[in-house]
Image (cartoon, helix red, strand yellow):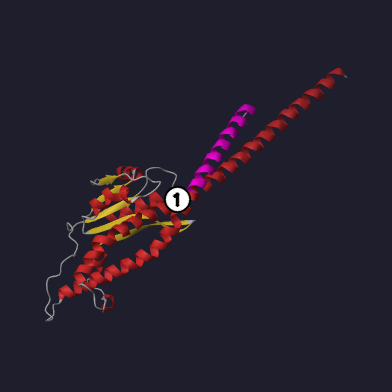
Amino acid sequence: MLNKKALQSEMAVLLSMQEIVGAYEEIAAMRMRKVKKSVLQNRDFLSGLNNLYNRVWYTYLHERRVNALGFPVKRPESVFVGNGKTVSVLVSANTRLYGDIIKKTFDLFLKSIVDVETDIVVIGKLGRQFMSESGLNREYKAFDIADTAYEREDMKDVLDYILAYTNVIVYHGLYVSVLTQNPTKTLVTGQALDLKEGNVKDELRCLIEPSTEEVAQFFEKQILSSVFEQSMFESSLSKYASRMISLDMASDNISNYLKAARFQTIKLRHLVNNIKQTERISGIALWD
């Protein structure tokens, strides 16, 4: 059993930790509320926009396969001027205390790229640490972006690098609810390649002006950066929600340790009182 001084010291440390955890939890909640509304609103909008983009691209590929006379023509891989390669992007974090969402995202990322020919981009210091610990002997490009907020200027270098690729796959956390965050991947570009054998319903049966090719080019050049930015904000939201759960669990653990420390303090006090009482009784017995 700890002595009185040790118990007091332990309780002081636990109380300080409880205050720090509470402050971090409030900050995480504040930041989560700040980005949650816009992320959830943009999620539905960009999801629909991405679906429309895929259908436009499929329509363009279909038009290029068959000319006006019905003869097949060579199908280009993309209207976008890319390098013909695929890049896989891991969005991690620079600091810890984000629960297990970062590790789960990395596990999905690692499983997806281990046997695939793809270039690699890692955003965040934790991602680089996980890469070195994984034993995967692959070169990758690293970027650091602050965890606190994502601004367009902060992402400019990353965007300039990855949008040179024909296919861009982003691995990040996805906010489902405050209690649930799942790792996921977003196909920023190249998703329509999977539609080359798609159903007839994927084709847009309407007039597309000025032309299908120009509309597809507009989508690829103007919309894809927005899809990538949304992936970054999705990651941010999932990290803050995961941090809240992690800190709430830490707060509960600290409360349990405090209860145990208080119980030990009371137990020690009773023990001291019992010793004093025994000494008094022994003293009385000596005088009798």
Quadrant of the drawing holding the C terminus: top right
Q: Residue furthest right?
A: 288
Which residue is nearer to you in this view: 224 or 166? 224
Q: Residue at x 39, y 65 (%)?
A: 44
User: Regarding mark 1 in the picture, which secondary structure is present there?
Assistant: helix
Which residue is nearer to you in this view: 40 or 75? 40
Where is residue 262? Give x, y as percent: 65, 37
Q: Residue at x 59, y 40 (%)?
A: 257
Crowd rating for badge 1 (residues with CA inside 10 Å; few <14, some 14–19, many 20+): many
Residue 27 on the magenta span: yes
Where is residue 57? Give x, y as percent: 23, 69
Q: Is residue 265 above or below residue 136?
A: above
Secondary structure of the magenta portion, mostly? helix
Where is residue 94? Give x, y as percent: 37, 43
Any part of residue 115 in sight: no
Q: Which residues are magenta?
A: 3-28
Q: Residue at x 58, y 37 (%)?
A: 15
Q: Residue furthest top?
A: 287
Where is residue 164? Give x, y as percent: 20, 55
Give left or right: position of 9 versus 186: right
Q: Which residue is mark 1?
A: 240
Any part of residue 232 in sight: yes
Q: Residue at x 27, y 45 (%)?
A: 142
